Amino acid sequence: MDHQQAARIRHYQPADLEDMYRICLQTADDGQDATALFTEPRLVGDVFAVPYAVLEPSLAFVAEDESGVCGYIVGALDTQAFDRRLEREWWPALRVRYPEPAPDQAAALPRVVRLAVQDIHHPWLTPAELTDRYPSHLHINLLPRMQDRGMGRELIKTLAAALREQGSRGLHLHVSLGNPRAMGFYRHVGFSRLPASDVGVFVMDLSDPSSTNS
Ligand SMILES: CC(C)(COP(=O)(O)OP(=O)(O)OC[C@H]1O[C@@H](n2cnc3c(N)ncnc32)[C@H](O)[C@@H]1OP(=O)(O)O)[C@@H](O)C(=O)NCCC(=O)NCCS
């Protein structure tokens, strides 16, 4: 018998930060639990989840059931401006907290750990060709107990509506080629894939009101 708990979406609150760190870590290895890969458990959340909630709280939403927060979606309205803000307000403290490893040490790190550390010290800047048309971007992560229940679709709809309200014309995201499940999901809920060889780049036109209705 299925004992799934009722779930709801609400705006992020500062008290959710610890849950966001935990959820990010438990889904960071191409959707699987990355706890065993990180000696610093907050590192991955400090890169891919928490700065969004802290710097753009109006675009951060959590999924919650009776057992607590079990997923989130976070976004940045203007990726170029967000990148600049991270450089001023976010990365400097993290560069002290997580020193850059020597190249031979970095090469020995698990891929997801290496990418997170690299982002802190040498942030990847999103090209203008992408942000001109799709200025906003997102990250979405749900714990296994909340997966495959329609919550991912609802979170995408919620964020897309908030982005439209704030005037965004387009949304993009990057996904590792090692996460085919997420790629199938994004395609199914209304994103299109752009040609790119080493990473999946998915986009959604927010000026089309039907883009999240499928
Ligand atoms: C990827 C993820 C966000 C998807 O959310 P979800 O709640 O599990 O997906 P949903 O149940 O909302 O699925 C929505 C629809 O997409 C479909 N879908 C899901 N995965 C699919 C896939 N791989 N291929 C095709 N369709 C898929 C579902 O069947 C459903 O279809 P329907 O609404 O027409 O019935 C979620 O599983 C997750 O957080 N996974 C772990 C972390 C992760 O990988 N995050 C993404 C990092 S880039």
Image (cartoon, rainbow, N blue to C red):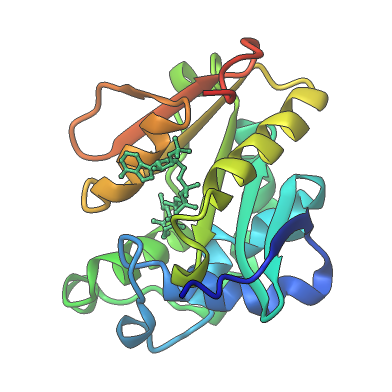
Location of residue 194 with respect to 24 vertically, above or below: above
Q: Residue furthest top?
A: 208
Depth check, front residue: 194 or 87: 194
x, y (%) of residue 31?
35, 62
Q: Which quadrant would residue 134 be assigned to in this image?
A: top right
* Total number of numbered discs in the rendering: 0
Residue 95 seen from this side: no
Residue 88, how many percent across, how many down? Answer: 69, 52
For this orientation, the residue located farthest to the front is: 1
Q: Relative to 88, is 23 above or below?
A: below
Is residue 105 shown above or below 137?
below
Q: Which quadrant of the structure image shows residue 122?
A: bottom left
Residue at position x 70%, y 39% from top? 158
* Side (left or right) of 179 relative to 151: left
Q: Residue at x 59, y 23 (%)?
A: 213
**Residue shown at 44%/26% (left/top)?**
191
Q: x and y percent of residue 112 in the render?
A: 31, 66
Q: Which residue is drawn at the image coordinates 32% and 67% (left, top)? A: 29
* Residue 35 visible, this orientation: yes
Provide residue 168's location: percent of width, then percent of height.
70, 22
Left or right: where 170 falls relative to 106 = right
Residue 17 lies left or right of residue 135; in this view the side is: right
